[in-house]
Image (tube, rainbow, N blue to C red):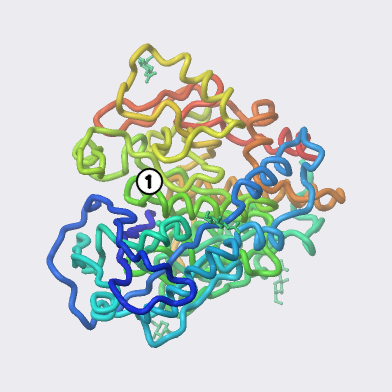
């Protein structure tokens, strides 16, 4: 299940008018960002003037590096701050823009009235959303250039532009503008009053409680009377009388079933392809919540290249502030080294206008979960893996990933991937033939959409054991997994993840870009973490 994140830019800036206290005289407009028309989009022409959009403006955060440093410290088992308190509340200050940036942007916003509605601000003030900014207004007041209607096959027509401008003096204060739309007995209650697991739902996916009960009757009778908390984020649907989503049912049934009796939360976030950045809405919501589950699983993702870099970086920074204290798991995708299209060899080309042949890494990868199949386990052929073109390899991954690259025959896939990039996935789990209940019927389903909630269910149980032992939750898993995980994960050494007309990467001894470090051995992981 893919989440279509299609944030193109629609923006520009003032052309003339009286300066405010915060508006310097030099209003020279400069292109802030421009991107090529993304894969599967077509330019149709000018957008209708009465069409309205929701703009988001990201103001530069003044201390992201401080947050990043703190995140690594409290996630490193050898650091004295490991598992230490910090962040959610603290992140608000760290993410906040400095006062100069706020004053400039406020002055500018007061001046360019984009909408009759007041702009909405994120808690850290680092985002401004302008609801119902109409295209006519944008053209008149911001003089933005070349608004385009772009067709997203198979049929959505959305207003987007591929380039926007800002006055020169705002470039250093505004990071980007984007349109809306980048055997212990586990059943014995232990830390269930403190622990929780959360599942995200996007694209109008919601989970059905009767199906969950039917699933429990089949698989886990002790849980049959248990349920979960369904939370609607910005109007996300939770309709128990109409058909639920297969993805949402899969995610809740396996994550909550494995983690039982850990309380479960399911967030249904408003947003289809038409509102292309539900991650940011959900992140705003969750970062402003008082109680955040210690483990969160997401089975949605996108091709990295369809997400503009600045947007990807912003989403990544938000996830970093969430990951300080929370284990955040993402499916690595179901396209092998390609993008999962039916004609992969046709689709593995860059979006940058150069149309270069390239593997297509997935996004986002916080802790990325790939897929295996069979017993003994081998890599699933669809297991999403490879190397980010946007994000450099983090230090915690350096040793494991370099060891893999050193073994690759000379010049293998030269030019097809970024040897210096963040390697994907981190871990993997069984991913085929999951039996779930959907609309009252048993069906078989699979993909990294299945391995991810399953892995997350185990992480929730690890957190349960830690909390029961009076220790803090695991938080960001990667530093721990790369340091100690090798002893507690089953190394997968057979199989590969073909795509883009190649045979992909092989599962090998140690980390590999098909199955990561391997699949969980719960007992051994428990010994590592408690
Ligand atoms: C605020 O941030 C901007 C952009 O990075 C910088 O130019 C300015 O000097 C900073 N101001 C303060 C007071 O830190
Ligand atoms: C579930 O609830 C029903 C009705 O109250 C009860 O008869 C049954 O024993 C409960 N099952 C479990 C496993 O708690
Ligand atoms: C829920 O779905 C049913 C069946 O499709 C529909 O009749 C009903 O109006 C929906 N309820 C809401 C609140 O959307
Ligand atoms: C994968 O393994 C096969 C068989 O050993 C080998 O021929 C191939 O070169 C390997 N591919 C990569 C990318 O390492």
- Is 483 left or right of 61, judged from the image as shown? right
Image position of 31 with respect to 69: above or below: below
Q: Outermost residue toward the left? A: 45
Q: Residue furthest top?
A: 410
Which residue corresponds to mark 1? 304
Considering only vertical position in the picture, is 474 above or below 315?
A: above
In the rendered view, would you say 24 is above or below 259?
below
Residue extending farthest to the right is 470
Which residue is nearer to you in this view: 236 or 95?
95
Q: Please give left or right for residue 5 compared with residue 520 in the image.
A: left
User: What residue is at 21 percent from the left and 66 percent from the top?
Assistant: 145
Residue 108 in view in this figure: yes
* Disc 1 C-beta below 8 A from ligand 4: no
The answer to whether one can see residue 155 in this image is no
- Residue 433, by quadrant, is top left
Q: Give the structural element (helix, strand or loop) at label 1.
A: helix
Report the side of 162 relative to 60 (left or right): left
The residue sitting at the front extreme is 25
Name the residue located 29 percent from the left edge and 61 percent from the top edge.
164
Find residue 394 and report its image quarter.
top right
Q: Looking at the image, is 198 positioned above or below residue 233?
A: above
Disc 1: CA contacts within 10 A as few (<14), some (14-19) or many (>=20): many
- Which quadrant does ligand 3 occupy? bottom left
Task: Tell me which residue sits at (47%, 69%) in the image.
Answer: 105
> Percent position (x, y) of residue 156?
23, 67
Q: Closer to the camera, 141 or 520?
A: 141
The x and y percentages for residue 290 are: 70, 69
* Corner quadrant of residue 242: bottom left
In the rendered image, residue 49, in percent from the top left (x then y), is placed at: 20, 80
Residue 255 percent across, percent down from the top left: 59, 55
Q: Quadrant of the N terminus?
A: bottom left
Position of the C terminus by quadrant: top right
């Amino acid at each position: 299940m893919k989440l279509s994140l299609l944030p193109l830019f629609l923006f520009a800036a003032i052309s003339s008018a009286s300066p405010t206290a915060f508006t310097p005289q030099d209003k020279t407009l400069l292109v802030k960002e421009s991107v090529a028309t993304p894969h599967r989009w077509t330019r149709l022409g000018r957008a209708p003037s009465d069409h309205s959009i929701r703009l988001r403006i990201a103001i530069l955060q003044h201390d992201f590096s401080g947050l990043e440093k703190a995140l690594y410290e409290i996630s490193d088992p050898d650091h004295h701050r490991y598992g230490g308190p910090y962040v959610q509340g603290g992140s608000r200050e760290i993410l906040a823009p400095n006062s100069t940036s706020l004053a400039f942007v406020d002055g500018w916003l007061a001046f360019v009235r984009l909408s009759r509605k007041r702009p909405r601000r994120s808690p850290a003030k680092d985002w401004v959303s302008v609801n119902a900014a109409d295209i006519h207004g944008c053209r008149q007041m911001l003089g933005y250039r070349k608004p385009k209607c772009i067709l997203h096959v198979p049929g959505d027509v959305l207003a987007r532009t591929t380039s926007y401008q800002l006055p020169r003096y705002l470039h250093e204060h505004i990071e980007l503008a984007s349109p809306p739309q980048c055997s212990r007995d586990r059943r014995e209650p232990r830390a269930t009053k403190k622990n929780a697991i959360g599942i995200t739902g996007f694209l109008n996916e919601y989970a059905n409680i009767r199906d969950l009960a039917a699933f429990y009757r089949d698989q886990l009778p002790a849980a049959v009377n248990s349920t979960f908390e369904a939370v609607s984020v910005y109007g996300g649907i939770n309709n128990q009388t109409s058909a639920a989503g297969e993805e949402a049912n899969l995610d809740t049934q396996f994550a909550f079933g494995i983690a039982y009796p850990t309380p479960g939360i399911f967030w249904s976030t408003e947003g289809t392809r038409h509102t292309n950045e539900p991650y940011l809405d959900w992140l705003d919501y969750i970062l402003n919540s008082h109680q955040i589950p210690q483990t969160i699983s997401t089975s949605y993702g996108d091709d990295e290249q369809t997400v503009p870099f600045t947007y990807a970086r912003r989403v990544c920074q938000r996830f970093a502030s969430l990951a300080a204290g929370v284990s955040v798991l993402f499916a690595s995708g179901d396209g092998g080294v390609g993008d999962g299209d039916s004609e992969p060899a046709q689709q593995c080309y860059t979006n940058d206008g150069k149309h270069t042949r390239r593997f297509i890494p997935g996004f986002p990868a916080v802790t990325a979960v790939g897929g295996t199949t069979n017993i003994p386990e081998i890599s699933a052929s669809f297991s999403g893996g490879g190397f980010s073109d946007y994000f450099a390899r983090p230090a915690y991954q350096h040793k494991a990933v370099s060891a893999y690259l050193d073994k690759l025959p000379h010049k293998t896939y030269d030019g097809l991937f970024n040897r210096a990039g963040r390697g994907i996935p981190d871990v993997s789990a069984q991913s085929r033939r999951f039996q779930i209940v959907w609309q009252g019927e048993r069906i078989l389903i699979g993909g990294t959409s299945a391995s991810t909630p399953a892995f997350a269910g185990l992480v929730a149980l690890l957190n349960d054991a830690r909390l029961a032992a009076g220790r803090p939750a695991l938080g960001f898993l990667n530093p721990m997994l790369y340091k100690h995980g090798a002893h507690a994960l089953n190394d997968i050494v057979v199989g590969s993840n073909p795509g883009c007309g190649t045979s992909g990467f092989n599962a090998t001894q140690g980390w590999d870009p098909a199955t990561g470090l391997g699949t969980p051995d719960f007992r051994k992981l428990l010994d590592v973490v408690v």
